[in-house]
Amino acid sequence: MKSLTIYRVLTYILIPVACFFGLMGFLILIPALGNPPMWFMLFMFASLVIYTFSSLKFLSNGIDRNAPCKPSLRDWIRVNAFVCLGMGALFFLNAVGIYMLGPVALQDFVERAMESQPNLPEGIDSSLFVSIIKGVAGFMLVVSILILVHVILTFKMLKQFAHVFQSSPLS
């Protein structure tokens, strides 16, 4: 029962995260039409949104109301959960990699990146970019842990509540 409570809390925490990534996906939709490598990022964002809201539907209908769910809902959850596992692992590795760089290496990386950007305004210094990168890495670390734990709990809940996906015999 404790894992169900954790699952419920994580599901409701992931809703604003999914909305944020849905907005980001919507904003990169037009640029992605002209840049095929962005399709992968768009696919991952869409998968997170689909996964979050399909697991919310499973939680509210299948678990809370004990109402029968379509087997296709289980398939949507599973397929998008695997994509979210990959996305969570990528976010986790990127965040840990940024934090493992150390302050000197991160500062050097930012300074080299700023030198390659000739159109930056005069007042922007590298310490601002370092703090932005650390903030994004912290966000990615928290989101990745949320996603990974939620997906693992989702697979447990799918096994535990498999009876809600059983198709009822026709009368």
Image: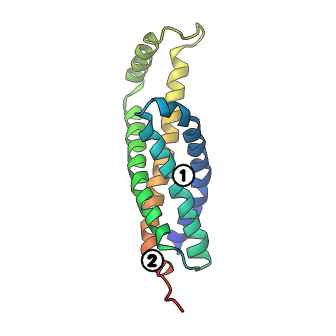
Between residue 110 and residue 161, name the one nearer to us: 161
- Number of numbered discs visible in the structure rendering: 2
- Front position in the image: 73 or 89: 73
Q: Which image quarter: residue 79?
A: bottom left
Q: In the visual, does 115 lie left or right of 21? A: left
Residue for badge 1: 49
Image-quadrant location for residue 155? bottom left
> Which amino acid type corresponds to the residue marked 1 in the rendered image?
Val
Mark 2 lies on a secondary structure that is helix
Residue placed most toward the observer, 76 or 82: 76
Identity of the residue drawn at 44% across and 39% down: 39
For the question of whether residue 90 can be seen, the reply is yes
Q: Give the camera-side residue of 10 and 155.
A: 155
Q: Residue at x 45, y 71 (%)?
A: 158
Question: Quick check: 62 above or below 139?
Answer: below
| Label 2 CA crowd tier, 10 Å (few <14, some 14–19, many 20+) | few
Residue 53: % across, % down: 57, 59
> Residue at (44%, 30%) from the top-left corner?
35
Circle 2 sits on which residue? 160
At 49% from the left and 33% from the top, the residue drawn is 33
Give the image location of residue 124, x and y in percent. Answer: 57, 13
Q: Position of residue 96 (x, y in %)?
A: 39, 39
Q: Quadrant of the C terminus?
A: bottom right
Q: Amino acid at mark 2?
A: Gln
Across and down, in percent, residue 137 comes to 48, 36
Q: Earlier in the sequence, mark 2 or mark 1?
A: 1
Residue sitting farthest toward the bottom: 171
